Image: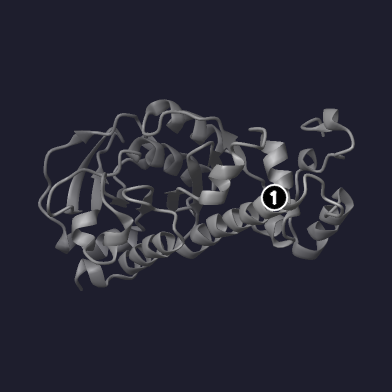
Amino acid sequence: MRILEMKFVKGFIKMADDGYQQGWHERNGGNLSYRLKPSEVEDVMPRLNSPGEWVPIGTSVPGLANEFFMVTGSGKYFRNIIVDPEVCLAIIELDDAGENYRIRWGLVEGGVPTSELPTHLMNHEVKKRTSEGRHRVIYHAHTTNTIALSFVLPLNDEIWTRELWEMATECPVVFPEGVGVVGWMVPGGRDIAVATSKLMEQYNVAIWAHHGMFCSGEDFDLTFGLMHTVEKSAAILVKVLSMSPIKHQTIMPEGFRKLEGQFNISLPERFLYEKTDPQAIGKK
């Protein structure tokens, strides 16, 4: 079977195009990575190119030693992935120390993996550990309404989580652990990778102020659905704030608590503070 006919490759390409169709990937914005399953590595191995030179990752991820990843290329446009995936995507292999990578397929016209590769891999390492290996997808996109809100909401995990939860009943069900927030940082470097990986210890969503969103999930559908849900909630909140600075009714803390039994979820109490007491934020 050709690599482009494999199920995980088709899923990767579909997710990338879904994000482009949402308007989240202007020009070469955004990036996507997927950690291959052992069975998928076995299936693609006969079709991979001969090993080339090792290239430093720029960080150390020993928990991902010898793993294979499909990643988007640096400077490649999401709009072109569905048209010419072999130009825009790569399968890379990590060495036995988790410090170097080499390209084994793709980027046939030249290029390198996404400039956010250190951030992706550091967070893959965290999510592999905290999810006991279930999480395999990391996705970054320039989600319009989320970026807009980062200019007006305090950059605070509790406030962002509560505001997003209030916009739709499904939100606390889809991301019951809440969302984390990273203040503006230069993208592509080690500092933002470290800051994001700290948040990923407890969240599956990190908001990058004035930049976009960073999500982790078990598969393509769950990860795209998570980002889609957060961004839709952000869009509702933008509309609410544009109509009135005051919400005349909303979901109250007791309402959220009732969802826990109904949907078998656990909502951290620190997000269920009483808004009449601003000092209560983050203290529960």
**What sort of colour scheme is used for the picture?**
one colour
> Could you tell me residue 127's position as x and y percent?
49, 44
Looking at the rendered image, the quarter that the N terminus falls into is bottom left
Q: Residue at x 44, y 54 (%)?
A: 24
The picture quadrant where one finds residue 264 is bottom right
Above or below residue 67? Residue 181 is above
Q: Quadrant of residue 192?
A: top left
Q: Which residue: 80% across, 64% down?
A: 262
Please identify the quadrant where the C terminus is shown.
top right
Q: Which residue, given by chain and number where applicable, does mark 1 sit on?
A: 242
**What's the residue type where badge 1 is placed?**
Ser
Left-right relation of 249 to 239: right
Q: Categorize mark 1 by other alpha carbons within 10 Å: few (<14), some (14-19), many (20+).
A: few
Q: Residue at x 23, y 55 (%)?
A: 88
Residue 114 to residue 231: above or below? above
Where is residue 77 shown, x and y percent of the image?
29, 53
Image check: 175 left or right of 49? right
In the rendering, at what x and y percent does residue 100 appear? 24, 35
270 lies above or below 170: above
Q: Is residue 210 visible?
A: yes
Residue sitting nearer the eye, 209 or 200? 209
The image position of residue 55, as x and y in percent, is: 19, 35
Q: Is residue 205 visible?
A: no
Q: Quadrant of residue 42?
A: bottom left
Is residue 217 left or right of 203 when viewed as pictured? Answer: left
Dot 1 lies on which element?
Answer: helix
Spot the residue most to the front.
Answer: 243
Q: Residue at x 56, y 57 (%)?
A: 226
